[in-house]
Image: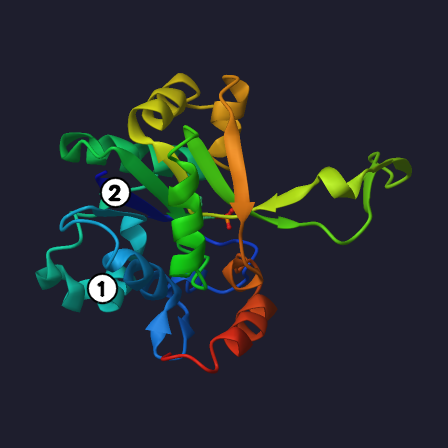
Amino acid sequence: KKISVVIVAAGSGSRFGDPLPKQYHHIGDKTLLRHCVEAFMQLCPPNHIQIVHNPAHQHHLDLAIEDLVDSGMLRPTVPGGATRQQSVLNGLRALQDASPDYVLIHDAARPGIDHDVIFRVLGALDKYKGAIPGIAVHDTIKQCDDDKAILRTIARDTLMRAQTPQGFDFKTILRAHTKFEGQEMTDDASLLEQMGIAVKCVAGSERNDKITRRDDLARLGEHFSDQQT
Ligand code: C5P
């Protein structure tokens, strides 16, 4: 099966609280974006990695990946949109002429992605149109009202925290993203759920947690201390 990858890196990272967007911060000597790109480079055919970026960050993007351009793995980068969902759709549209069977959609803010997680997602696509990595929830989860008064407790044994890469049959996810363009959902699996298409959850990893705030960087960096960084 032909696999393509969309890496969404067009966010401005307002919760991160730094003028330099989080995807261009470093863990070790590599940017978060670079860690992500390298994780997928051995897994897909040449010219099948589609980065979606914010043109305002062009300089940072060039610094992060310019030496990879000659590798032939990267497709010309395309601009993102105002929401993650729009950025993904721009990436999927740009991949259409590559006509992949499967696409893996990954957040540039998850530099701890590894091949084990990627293979579990791909493995589930034999049976499902969509598959995502997830982590069991260990805290007790409360649903609250606007005043933060608790409305109810949600049975945690049914809950999973969704990660990326989220893998899909390419035509199915492109159709779903086109159908729901302009509506905001925070991941791609949600779109298939809306259409009643089953999506499988496979085991993710703590190392693959998303960088959202500055102190996440230091915490995740510990997972990389025994690595090449
Ligand atoms: O904001 P959040 O952390 O949920 O973003 C997840 C991923 O989506 C990040 O890699 C971010 O760069 C990307 N994103 C994007 N375009 C947007 C918003 C977020 O590519 N408009």
Q: Label 2: which residue?
A: 4
- Could you give the CA–CA distance between mark 2 and mark 1, rounded to whole angstroms? 18 Å
Q: Label 1: which residue?
A: 65
Which x, y percent locates residue 44? 22, 50
Question: Mark 1: few, some, or many residues within 10 Å (few <14, many ≥20)?
Answer: some
Question: Mark 2: few, some, or many residues within 10 Å (few <14, many ≥20)?
Answer: many
Q: Identify which amino acid the numbered label 2 is placed on.
A: Ser
Which x, y percent locates residue 138? 75, 54
Looking at the rendered structure, the secondary structure element under dot 2 is: strand
Seen at 41% across and 65% down, the residue is 20
Seen at 67% across and 49% down, the residue is 136
Q: Identify which amino acid the numbered label 1 is placed on.
A: Ile
Give the quadrant of the N terminus. top left
Q: Is residue 132 left or right of residue 42?
A: right
Give the quadrant of the C terminus. bottom left
Q: Which mark is residue 121?
A: none
Residue 115 seen in the figure: yes
Residue toward you, 166 or 178: 166
Residue toward you, 59 or 186: 186
Labels 2 and 1 touching (C-beta < 8 A): no
